[in-house]
């Protein structure tokens, strides 16, 4: 089969001879023994056919850009583009509001990084069940916006080029793959990150974690730089100080293109997830722009990523898990978290090896990732009321150092001394030590038979109190912290009190349910457990209410505030509905009213607030009508209204003395399940935590052997 070049060879053109454009050498050059050389095209052909193709591609690109711009919230669209849309001029140029993390951001710097992508596996040393899915339009969000023409719905030419690039890249490997793998094993040098890649090099041509296309730096100003910069800044301003999974300086350098971006597509997943979290956590309304960003990250993921292991992917999976949990997809987040933990152990993040040649900064990054995983994993275990799976044995990695980023950099040869002040790593260090100290408490709480009050008090004294006294003074509960660390500090205190509420609430529930028959267990241990739980619940409600009044109102703060507030509110709710004539009833009523007001205040930035509000009103709304403010709360805030509360009218005040709720203990337990474990389906909570008749046996055990009462005889 003969092949012909697109144009004449250089010799024939120079001599103005008729070239037959044969490859590899034209006939004239063969005949006269000349050096036949064809030049590559430097310019596109000026033909009608080529111009028509370009016009068609331009029309498709403009239509796709318009469609993607429509996905953005109105407030995020540039004014200029909105004005142009009103003119319906299809040929007018448009500013592209999308952004593409696959291209380095331009920076105001006299130098730029190399555009050569890093080799696979090399990391620079400087460093739900049936859950709701976001209703996104069917657009090619999986394709980075910078590569618009690769959309399968418009043009496959660039996509074919991408596949060809990946195929060519993999086919550079020797044909004898087994032999080549053996040679690599013999020649491989030990690294400080334990990365691994078990992909079949000749078969995985698509969706490879290392398959990012080379993308040169553009020479013109990136119109979307201010948008992406704001997203990254938002992430590090609020989220990073609580969970320092990334090293800020290293990530920013990679984002700006100052240093190579490691691990190909893994870094893109991380970047889009960082942007999504930055948008979500700092949002002051219920916009869903972050979902589009996360859809980009998720579209890059594939099963091939399960065959590689690197720190970048662990960081990405960890952040994805926490994002999914906060986006009301607890089971999805739990699954991503499991992948991250397994991959982290595969990378050896749980160990520190003697004589290891690793820089202090890289070692600290590994520690921060591992213990951030610990905080997420143990926290999710308690949230979902599931058995603990975090490895407490065989872990030989130190807690992160409490040092400032300026004291530990890429060129540091030794570890600096720890500072006696708050740093971005104080919160994760404190929370990790808290979970390690209190895991035995949680394990006992979910075990059968349920623990006694004496047992819980002893665990509190032996495990929780030593940890509390060991918290540094600059991060203690009464310490005054800089504004940027206020949320991290508050969450740590709420988490500690929440554990104590979980420890002692069985005794509060039992005492409240027994109040109707006046059969109370007044033993010192039970009374002390009851009082401790009430005190911690009251302190939590007051703390969260005050926090929300005084500090920045954003989605991250609202998520934690609602979660801990909702669980604390269970205590006064269960007491008030069973003993509304108690001497403490006024205090309980005030706590519930404060909770309701706070939940209403959280509603603009937390979509779960109306549901939580309704649960509380269903439980004890009828007992709040003697409070004028509570009686008018639904009328004053119609946006929070949901289904009407049975037997409750907000504008009426009951006449006479309120009576305790007329429900059996089992019915009441079923009613409060959603407050005890708000992120767990009722049946799952009953199965995991209660197990058979464990709770009913526990309730009967406090009746001093008298199980014949109207409430406990059934």
Image (cartoon, helix red, strand yellow):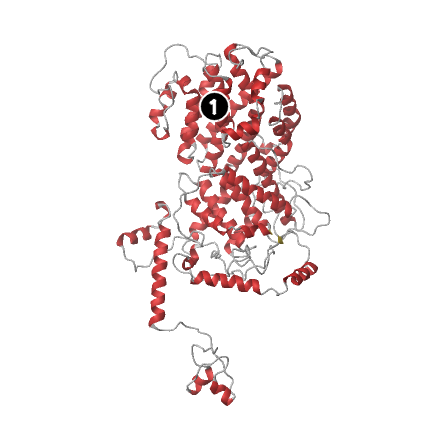
The single residue placed furthest to the bottom in the displayed view is 32
Residue 653 x %, y %: 35, 15
Residue 362 x %, y %: 63, 49
Residues 130 and 392: in front is 130
Question: With respect to residue 392, does 144 lie above or below?
Answer: below
Residue 108 x %, y %: 47, 57
Q: Which residue is mark 1?
A: 671
Would you identify the image quadrant in which residue 622 lies? top left
Q: Residue at x 53, y 31 (%)?
A: 684
Q: Residue at x 49, y 52 (%)?
A: 300
Q: Residue at x 43, y 87 (%)?
A: 15
Residues 169 and 274: in front is 169
Residues 54 and 530: in front is 54
Q: Secondary structure at mark 1?
A: helix
Q: Residue at x 45, y 42 (%)?
A: 280
Does residue 115 appear in the picture of this structure?
no
- In the displayed structure image, the side of residue 91 where residue 696 appears, left or right: right
């Amino acid at each position: 089969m003969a092949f012909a070049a697109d144009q004449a060879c250089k010799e024939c053109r120079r001599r103005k001879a008729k070239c037959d454009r044969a490859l590899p050498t034209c006939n004239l050059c063969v005949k006269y023994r000349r050096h036949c050389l064809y030049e590559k095209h430097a310019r596109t052909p000026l033909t009608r056919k080529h111009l028509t193709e370009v016009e068609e591609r331009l029309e498709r690109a403009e239509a796709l850009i318009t469609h993607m711009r429509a996905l953005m919230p109105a407030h995020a669209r540039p004014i200029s583009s909105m004005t142009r849309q009103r003119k319906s001029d299809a040929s007018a140029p448009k500013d592209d509001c999308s952004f593409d993390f696959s291209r380095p951001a331009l920076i105001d710097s006299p130098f730029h990084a190399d555009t050569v992508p890093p080799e696979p596996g090399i990391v620079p040393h400087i460093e739900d069940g049936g859950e709701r899915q976001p209703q996104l339009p069917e657009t090619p969000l999986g394709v980075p916006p910078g590569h618009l023409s690769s959309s399968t719905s418009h043009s496959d030419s660039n996509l074919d080029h991408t596949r060809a690039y990946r195929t060519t890249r993999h086919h550079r490997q020797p044909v004898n793959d087994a032999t080549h793998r053996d040679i690599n094993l013999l020649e491989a040098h030990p690294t400080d990150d334990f990365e691994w890649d078990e992909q079949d090099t000749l078969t995985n041509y698509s969706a490879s974690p290392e398959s990012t296309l080379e993308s040169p730096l553009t020479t013109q100003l990136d119109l979307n730089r201010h948008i992406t910069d704001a997203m990254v800044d938002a992430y590090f301003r609020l989220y990073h100080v609580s969970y320092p999974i990334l090293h800020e300086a290293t990530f920013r350098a990679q984002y700006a293109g100052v240093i190579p971006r490691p691990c190909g597509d893994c870094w893109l997943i991380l970047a889009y997830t960082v942007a999504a979290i930055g948008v979500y956590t700092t949002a002051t309304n219920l916009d869903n722009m972050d979902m589009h960003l996360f859809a980009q990250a998720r579209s890059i993921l594939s099963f091939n990523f399960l065959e590689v292991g690197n720190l970048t992917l662990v960081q990405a999976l960890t952040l994805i898990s926490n994002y999914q949990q906060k986006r009301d997809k607890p089971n999805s987040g739990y699954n991503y978290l499991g992948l991250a933990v397994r991959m982290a152990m595969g990378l050896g993040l749980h160990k520190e090896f003697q004589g290891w040649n690793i820089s202090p900064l890289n070692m600290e990054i590994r520690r921060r990732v591992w213990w951030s995983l610990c905080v997420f994993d143990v926290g999710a275990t308690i949230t979902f009321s599931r058995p603990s799976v975090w490895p407490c044995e065989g872990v030989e990695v130190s807690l992160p150092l409490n040092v400032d980023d300026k004291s530990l950099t890429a060129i540091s040869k030794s570890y600096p001394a720890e500072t006696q002040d708050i740093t971005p790593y104080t919160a994760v260090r404190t929370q990790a030590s808290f979970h390690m100290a209190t895991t035995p408490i949680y394990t006992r709480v979910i075990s059968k038979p349920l623990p006694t009050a004496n047992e819980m008090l002893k665990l509190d004294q032996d495990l929780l109190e030593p940890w509390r006294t060991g918290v540094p003074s600059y991060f203690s509960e009464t310490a005054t912290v800089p504004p940027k660390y206020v949320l991290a500090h508050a969450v740590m205190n709420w988490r500690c009190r929440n554990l104590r509420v979980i420890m002692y609430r069985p005794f509060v529930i039992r005492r409240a349910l027994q109040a109707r028959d006046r059969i109370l267990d007044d033993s010192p241990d039970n009374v002390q457990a009851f009082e401790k739980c009430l005190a911690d619940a009251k302190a939590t409600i007051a703390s969260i209410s005050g926090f929300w009044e005084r500090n920045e109102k954003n989605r991250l703060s609202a998520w934690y505030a609602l979660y801990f507030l909702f669980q604390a509110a269970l205590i006064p709710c269960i007491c008030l509905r069973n003993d509304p004539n108690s001497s403490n009833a006024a205090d309980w009523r005030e706590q519930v009213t404060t909770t309701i007001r706070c939940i209403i205040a959280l509603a603009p930035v937390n979509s779960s607030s109306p549901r939580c509000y309704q649960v509380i009103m269903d439980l004890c709304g009828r007992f709040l009508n003697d409070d004028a403010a509570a009686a008018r709360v639904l009328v004053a805030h119609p946006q929070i209204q949901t289904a009407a509360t049975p037997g409750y009218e907000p504008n009426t005040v009951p006449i006479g003395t309120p009576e305790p709720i007329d429900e059996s203990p089992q019915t009441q337990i079923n009613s409060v399940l959603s407050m005890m474990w708000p992120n767990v389906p009722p049946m799952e909570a009953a199965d995991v935590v209660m197990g058979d008749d464990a709770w009913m046996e526990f309730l009967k055990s406090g009746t001093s052997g008298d199980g014949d009462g109207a409430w406990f005889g059934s």
